[in-house]
Amino acid sequence: MSLGIIIVTHTPEMAEGLARLLRHIAKNVPVTFAGGNSMGQIGTSMSQVQLAVNTNEATELLAFYDFGSARRNVELASAFSAKPIHLYDVALVEGAHTAAVSLQAGVDRAGLDKQLLALQVKA
């Protein structure tokens, strides 16, 4: 299984900017994102999350989100996806950065989970 990252936030700029950074530092890790609602405004969109899941080349996904409906939409997308999706309740930027760098370096998911435990901030 190959691992990829999806970023889900309430603003398009935040999601796109973080995805751009991760793609720059971890060129071999598939990164897709969903930001904002379907009108490009603040919010989240289930259809955009599904698009991020479906267009990510990886067979298994690590999901990083900001809060609230972003998490709920990832959970809902997970229910409709054949790809396993793992949600991480960690600081968004730090967690996604740690995951990207670790995956680029060949760390497996178990090792990554141990690293991300220190960054857990959400309940």
Image (cartoon, rainbow, N blue to C red):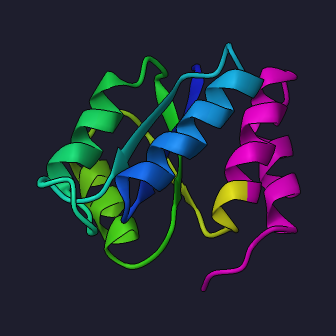
Q: Is residue 97 left or right of residue 23?
A: right
- For image coordinates 49% across by 54% down, the residue present is 14
As for residue 91 lying within the magenta part, the answer is no
Tell me what residue is drawn at x 50 percent, y 32 percent.
60
Check the picture and name the quadrant holding the N terminus.
top right
Kindly indicate the quadrant of the structure image that contains residue 88. Answer: bottom right
Residue furthest bottom as drawn: 123
Decide: is 8 above or below 29.
below
- Residue 114 belongs to the span the image colors magenta: yes
Looking at the magenta stretch, what is its main secondary structure? helix
Residue 46 or residue 16, whichever sits in front: 16
Residue at 75% in and 45% down: 97
Which quadrant would the C terminus be assigned to in this image? bottom right
Q: Position of residue 52 (x, y in %)?
A: 33, 36
Which residues, given as a range, are shown in magenta?
A: 94-123
Q: Would residue 39 be found to the left or right of residue 98 on screen?
A: left
